[in-house]
Amino acid sequence: MTTAFSAALKRGKAFLTPTNSSTSIPKLCDSFVKALEGTLFPKVNPAIDGEGCDHDCESCTIKYPAKFKIDEDEELYGQVNGWATHMLVATGKTDWVRDVSDEKGSVMEAVRDCGKSMLSASNLPPPQDHHSTSDPTTILLLPSFTIIENVTPKTVPILIEHHINPAPTSTTPLPPSHTTLKTPNAQEPPVHTSTLQHQDPPPPSPAPSPLTTRPCPHQYLILLCSQSTRDARCGQSAPLLRREFERHLRPLGLHRDLHDERPGGVGIYFISHVGGHKFAANVMVYRRAGATTRTGGADGGKVGGEGMGEGSQCIWLARVRPEDCEGIVKFTVLKGKVVKPERQLRGGFDRERGLVSW
């Protein structure tokens, strides 16, 4: 066996062998690769994150009902289907018909076949004049962290063409964190008058869209499946977990209720069935790129000049219990680490490193 062939074989073996390192799988150009188990997100490390980082919360007093039983044996990681974008439709409710896309005359029915977009009904508050499923409502689009308003079933084609199709997806590389600025004293190339005279006229401006958009004010999102019509355990676990998450977010100045539009902080929303209710509770954590938080203080966890870009990661956990909430806030939400990956990590994506679980 030649020396060159042996070296190539070793490189191939190193690439395919799973390790606990968060950098074990290289990103090939702008393509995304499936991360092996244990490589998508780093696991907490007592040497770095402090002794007890992997322990349950000792001050938690909230408990699930005695008959709350789930599947503890089936393998979790890598079993979720990939998704490009995630639409959260504002309904103001915490429970829905069994399949939300079956709700007649609703936006959810109109977008049911929108490619690889995940559709979730949510308890996001709809507009005050929203009284029926056909009235204008609001959509939170991820991972772009964009709020789209005035959406109706009739405007769904505009929504798809002008907002969903061009939007960043879970496998879109993040844009550069810094744009190249012009040097103030740099000379511009000369512009010839003859060139200007023969330029084609600019294309006409597109017709104004009835939809309006604005950035989501939150720095992080915690999504909890609450749909009891699919499984009672989801309806039982979601409100209990929200109370416990809020208990740990308040001292950090990061708690945001449904109508709190202060920039930064953590938004907690109930969503419809995401699959895998036998692994309740399902929790999805979305994190923006470059998120930096000053916790506590008068600014209430306001973002300090960074972190209001597109979503960089989604960390999808299952088998979450109230005693897990402290660790999820401290390490998963704020640092992008997982406390119990072997037991709880279902999958997700990391756009910065070009990794997905599917």
Image: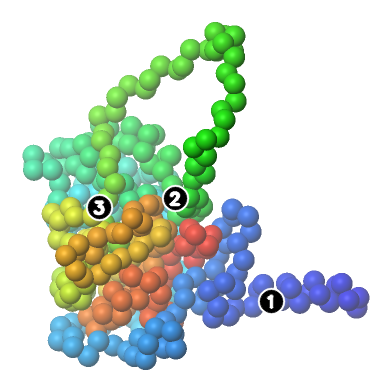
Q: Nearer the viewer, mark 1 or mark 3?
A: 3
In percent of width and height, residue 54 lies at: 36, 87
Is residue 273 something one can see in this rendering?
A: no
Q: Residue at x 15, y 56 (%)?
A: 260
Callout 1 environment at 10 Å: few (<14), some (14 to 19), or many (20+)? few
Residue at the front extreme, as displayed? 185
- Circles 1 and 2, Cβ within 8 Å, touching? The answer is no
Q: Residue at x 29, y 59 (%)?
A: 303
Q: Residue 3: name its quadrant.
A: bottom right
Q: Is residue 119 left or right of residue 62?
A: right
Q: Quadrant of the N terminus?
A: bottom right
Q: Residue 265: name its quadrant.
A: bottom left
Instruction: Report, in whole angstroms, how far the alpha carbon at label 2 lies from the one at label 3.
Output: 19 Å
Callout 3 environment at 10 Å: few (<14), some (14 to 19), or many (20+)? some
Pick whichever, 186 or 122, lies toward us.
186
Instruction: Report, in whole angstroms, how far the alpha carbon at label 1 lies from the one at label 2.
Output: 30 Å
Callout 2 environment at 10 Å: few (<14), some (14 to 19), or many (20+)? many
User: Could you tell me the amino acid type at mark 3?
Assistant: Pro
| Image height of 14 relative to 182, above or below | below
At mark 3, the secondary structure is loop
Q: Which label was assigned to residue 14?
A: 1
**Residue at the spot of label 2:** 169
Q: Is residue 17 left or right of residue 172?
A: right
**Residue at the spot of label 3:** 217
Q: Residue at x 43, y 84 (%)?
A: 48
